[in-house]
Image: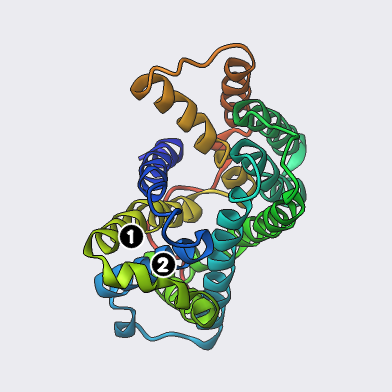
Amino acid sequence: MPAPLLFVLSGLTQYLGAALAVGIFGVVAASTVAWLRIAVAALVLVAWRRPWRLAWGGRDLRTAVVFGVVLAVMNVAFYVAIDHLPLGTAVAIEFLGPVAVAAVTGHGWRDRVGIAVAAVGVVLLAGVSLDGGRDAVVGLVAIGVAAACWAAYILLGRRVARAASGGITGLSVAMAAGAVVLAPFLAGGAGPVLRDARLAALVVAIAVCSSVVPYALEQVVLRRVRAATFAVLLALLPATAAVIGAVVLRQVPHGLEVVGLLLVSGAIVLTGLDRDEPATDEAPPPA
């Protein structure tokens, strides 16, 4: 399956999970909801992949643990940010992480021009608002942390995806590590979920839709493409949201939103997916 289509599927599940999460924010703090996503997703992935069956090298295990902590902090920081900033502003600023990765790791002018075009498209699609309210500083700091973590997520995630004991199995170890490291700080607010079966079911659904499926699909994509190309493909997520809004909610994009969609599409073509590494689901041979 082509990498762009995998990203579209990833985006669809993420937006479904976000829709489910809306009803929880009034009961559980946004940061705790983000941690619960990671913790439940870790349980699902560990039960599915059973990572203890593999022989883990010290380097692969350390990389997976660091990747998991980065992934968990990224999710928590983003949830805190959107609790203080308009969603469009947060999405646009967070995209600075992929922009930095493409700028540093890109090969030639096409990668760098492509990510610049994609960034402009994301800004137009996100509907950036400069009015963030009195507590916008908290949101800006949080989204800055999320952007930095997103950049690290791309680089570390590719290493996990291509490791002999990596891929989705490596992701299961990573998520478990992230959940454990952040548990002392965020688990205390999960009481309402433990006492309400309906909330617990919603959290499981959110974890599967917003973490298990999209991050597993991204592990597949990270095996197949360069980091710079992956960064550009991330622009498909807000583009997918615009398309789904038009089809499902009849929120037809117009004006600058249409320009944003065209820019994102052009950026993906410009990066030249045919120049990426051969598609493979097998781990590379050991050195």
Give the quarter of the figure containing the C terminus. Answer: bottom right
Above or below: residue 225 compared with residue 44: above
Between 125 and 10, the one lying in front of the other is: 125
SS at circle 1: helix
Q: Report which quarter residue 215 is drawn in.
A: bottom left
Residue, disc 1: 203
Asked if disc 1 and disc 2 are in contact, CB closer than 8 Å, the reply is yes
Residue, disc 2: 36
On the image, the x and y values in percent for residue 41 come to 36, 65
Type of the residue with mark 1: Val
Q: Residue at x 74, y 32 (%)?
A: 113
The extreme top residue here reads 255
On the image, the x and y values in percent for residue 67 come to 55, 70
Question: Between marks 1 and 2, how big is the CA–CA gap?
Answer: 7 Å
Q: Report which quarter residue 122 is drawn in.
A: top right
SS at circle 2: helix
Q: Residues within 10 Å of mark 1 (few under 14, many from 20)?
A: many
Residue 158 in view here: no
Residue 231 in view here: yes
Type of the residue with mark 2: Leu
